[in-house]
Image (cartoon, rainbow, N blue to C red):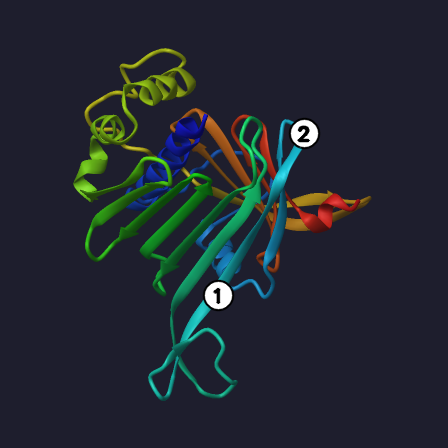
C-alpha cells in the first residue's frame, strides 16, 4: 500500500511538472457564465489577503485537512527581498510563493500522512522552482524541480531500507514510462495503466506523452447557505479525460476544488453551513 501511494505522489508531481512545462491554452467551451482570462483569477489567488483552509473528502468521507497560502515577494529600497515589508519601503514586486500543505488519514495506513508543496513564481506567473514532501512513516518522499537548472530531483528515504536519490533532466519527462519503471518498477506502472487508460496502453505508453490542459475561467455563482455569491470558476480536463474544477472567491480565496475519483476539497467556512 505504501508503494502505491509513493507512486501516486510521483505521478501527481510529474503531471504538475508537465502542466507547467507545456503552457496551457485557454478554451472556448460555451458553458454558463461570462468568460475571462484565467490569468486574472490566478493573480487573485496569488495575492489573496487570507489563507484558504480546506477539508479533504473522498466519496463523502472526510480524510483530513489542507491549507493554501500565497505570499507576495517584494524588494525594499535596501535590496532585501521580503513578503512583509513596512508600507512605504517597497520598491518593486519580485514574485510570488505558494504553499500547499496538509495531512490525511488514509485507510490501511497507520498514522497521519503529511504532505507539503511549495512553488515560487516570477512576476509573469512563470514558475521558478517547486518542492514537494510526502511523509508516511517509515517513508519520506521528496521531489524538487528547478526551472533554471532544468532538472528534477527525486529522493526516497525509507527508515527500513535506506535512501535512494535520482536526478532527471526535463527532457526525460517526455519518456515517463522509463522514469516510472526506474523509480517504481513495473507493477505500479501497470496499475497506472489500468486506472488511467482503462486497460489500454497505446496512448498512455507512447514514447512521448504531452499532457495538455485547456484551462477556462468564467464568472459564476455559488450558493452559501441560502445566499448566492459571485465567484470565479476555473476548470480543465486532465489527459483529455478527467475534469478538474476550482471555485475561487472574488478576493482570491479557494472555496472548493473538485478532482477525479470524487475527491473534493471544501473551504472550512463552507462546511459549517
Residue to which mark 2 is pinned: 60
For the point 45% across and 87% down, the residue is 89
Q: Nearer the viewer, residue 121 or 42?
A: 121
Q: Secondary structure at mark 2?
A: loop
Is any part of residue 173 visible from this angle?
yes
For the point 51% across and 50% down, the residue is 101
Q: Position of residue 61 (x, y in %)?
A: 67, 30
- Is 255 drawn above or below residue 61 in the view shown? below
Q: Which mark is residue 71?
A: 1
Mark 2 to mark 1 CA distance (whole Å): 31 Å
Q: Nearer the viewer, residue 20 or 192?
A: 192
**Pointer 2: residues within 10 angstroms few (<14), some, or many (20+)?**
few
Q: Residue furthest front?
A: 160
Looking at the image, residue 202 sits to the left or right of residue 93; the answer is left
Q: Secondary structure at mark 1?
A: strand
Q: Position of residue 22 (x, y in %)?
A: 29, 42
Q: Residue furthest right?
A: 226
Counting every numbered tag in the picture gives 2
User: Which badge, 2 or 1, is on the more N-terminal residue?
Assistant: 2
Is any part of residue 213 visible from this angle?
no
Q: Position of residue 153 (x, y in %)?
A: 26, 46
For the point 59% across and 66% down, the residue is 49
Quadrant of res 206: top left
Looking at the image, residue 131 sits to the left or right of residue 183; the answer is right
For the point 46% across and 73% down, the residue is 83
Quadrant of res 21: top left
Q: Position of residue 20 (x, y in %)?
A: 33, 46
Question: In the image, which is nearer the foreground, mark 2 or mark 1?
Answer: 2
Amino acid at each position: 500500500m505504501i508503494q502505491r501511494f509513493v507512486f501516486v505522489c510521483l505521478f501527481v508531481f510529474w503531471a504538475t511538472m508537465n502542466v507547467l512545462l507545456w503552457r496551457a491554452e485557454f478554451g472556448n467551451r460555451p458553458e454558463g457564465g461570462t468568460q475571462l482570462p484565467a490569468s486574472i483569477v490566478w493573480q487573485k489567488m496569488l495575492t489573496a489577503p487570507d489563507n484558504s483552509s480546506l477539508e479533504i473528502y473522498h466519496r463523502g468521507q472526510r480524510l483530513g485537512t489542507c491549507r493554501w497560502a500565497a505570499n507576495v515577494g517584494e524588494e525594499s529600497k535596501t535590496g532585501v527581498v521580503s513578503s512583509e515589508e513596512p508600507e512605504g519601503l517597497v520598491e518593486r514586486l519580485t514574485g510570488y510563493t505558494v504553499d500547499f500543505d496538509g495531512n490525511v488519514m488514509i485507510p490501511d495506513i497507520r498514522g497521519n500522512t503529511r504532505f507539503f508543496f511549495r512553488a515560487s513564481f516570477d512576476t509573469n506567473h512563470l514558475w521558478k522552482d517547486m518542492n514537494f514532501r510526502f511523509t508516511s512513516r517509515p517513508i519520506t518522499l521528496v521531489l524538487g524541480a528547478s526551472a533554471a537548472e532544468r532538472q528534477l530531483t527525486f529522493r526516497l528515504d525509507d527508515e527500513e531500507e535506506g535512501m535512494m536519490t535520482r536526478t532527471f533532466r526535463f527532457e526525460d519527462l517526455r519518456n515517463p514510462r522509463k522514469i516510472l519503471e526506474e523509480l517504481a518498477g513495473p507493477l505500479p506502472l501497470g496499475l497506472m495503466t489500468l486506472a488511467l487508460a482503462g486497460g489500454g496502453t497505446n496512448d498512455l505508453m507512447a514514447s512521448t506523452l504531452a499532457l495538455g490542459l485547456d484551462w477556462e475561467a468564467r464568472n459564476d455563482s455559488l450558493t452559501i447557505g441560502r445566499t448566492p455569491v459571485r465567484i470565479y470558476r476555473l476548470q480543465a480536463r486532465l489527459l483529455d479525460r478527467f475534469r478538474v474544477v476550482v471555485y475561487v472567491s472574488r478576493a482570491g480565496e479557494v472555496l472548493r476544488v473538485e478532482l477525479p475519483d470524487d475527491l473534493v476539497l471544501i473551504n472550512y467556512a463552507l462546511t459549517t453551513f
